[in-house]
Amino acid sequence: MVIPIQLENNENIRYDITIDKLPHLTFDTKVAIVTNPTVSQYHLDTLLAHIDAKALHVVTIPDGEEYKNLETVETILNELFSHKLDRKSLLIAFGGGVIGDMTGFTASLYQRGIGFIQIPTTLLAQVDASVGGKTGVNNAFGKNLVGAFYQPKAVYIDTEFLKTLPSREFAAGLAELIKMAVMFDREFFEFLETADLNDKVTLEKAIARSVELKAWVVNQDEKEAGIRAVLNYGHTFAHVIENETAYKTYLHGEAVAIGMVMANHLAHALGLMSEEEIKRVETLLRKHNLPVIYTVLDVDAFYDKFFLDKKSMNDKIKFILPNGIGQFEMRNDIEAAAVKKVLSGFAGAN
């Protein structure tokens, strides 16, 4: 299956997202694969067997969200310079969302920009991180605060790479699938409630629908001026959770799962979501062993960290909330007291 990205406001940017077996790729230029030891151990030989290039180099960086920073980007850049890549060279992001984000950001910087492609090996990266051109790194102030919108030349999604994915990582990717369904497609949500995602055909169908929805959003709004911000449902809360736990306690998708639950309770407080709908979302998250509880130790400190979110402007926090299941609202007019009251409900979580 091929899903096109064609940016409405930039006719020069078009690329395909291919969901199928990885094809043989031939490049008449130097190519550098950016990956980590975990992915290399299982899949690097497979990728190398599918690539012909003028010269091929492998750049291996440490595995983990804690290495998603400018220091690691500089390490990648130094490798590229040492191998004398030029402006026609190409990078391949071969790994999960961390690899994809850093490789894309590095590509945007190297000699003012070279091409890159995404070959995601985690479910989260396949359904979300590899699509749409968001690149960047974390810093002491928060997640993905340094980065660029920089689109890949192509995305190749092959579910064979998921066979070695730990169950916890697989579940983290499902959180992003559920996110898309709650925001945009009630029928898709109902499909996920009963779907056996351990079945390859069913999983590919779910991935394809999630990618279709994200492509539809990105094609309209590349740089998050409007509807693309909806993709951050659950993330405003999740980024604070990740920051408070130093990116070591939860996988990104796990934090997003908790963030969705928090957003749902805020939506309920505003009359946008019923208790029955909250329960349905939590039930689906729990079905896949995703966390739904987080203990807020300091409500005021948690709230203050919202202002480090990229969506906050003019001292106002933009919250992405479900309006039932399958619809959304973007709100920047919610009083601090209302938000803190919801957060207080998590202060006694256990």
Image (cartoon, helix red, strand yellow):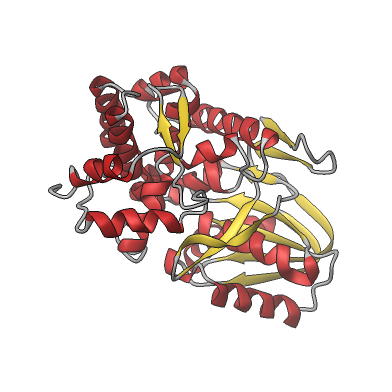
- Using the image, determine if residue 301 lies above or below residue 346: below
Residue 277 percent coordinates (x, y): 29, 22
Residue 172 percent coordinates (x, y): 39, 46
- With 174 as the anchor, is 69 left or right in this view? right
- Using the image, determine if residue 88 lies above or below residue 341: below
Does the rendering let one see residue 292?
no
Report which quarter residue 242 is drawn in: bottom left
Residue 348 percent coordinates (x, y): 12, 48
Residue in view at x 85 percent, y 43 percent: 12
- With 345 as the anchor, is 97 left or right in this view? right
Count of numbered tags? 0
Residue 99 percent coordinates (x, y): 56, 61
Does the rendering let one see residue 102?
yes
Instruction: State which quarter of the image contains the N terminus.
Output: top right
Report which quarter residue 240 is drawn in: bottom left
Residue in view at x 34 percent, y 66 percent: 246
Residue in view at x 32 percent, y 45 percent: 336
Residue in view at x 69 percent, y 32 percent: 2
Q: Nearer the viewer, residue 193 or 311?
A: 311
Q: Nearer the viewer, residue 255 or 204?
A: 255
- With 8 as the anchor, is 287 left or right in this view? left
Q: Nearer the viewer, residue 152 or 331?
A: 331
Report which quarter residue 150 is drawn in: bottom right
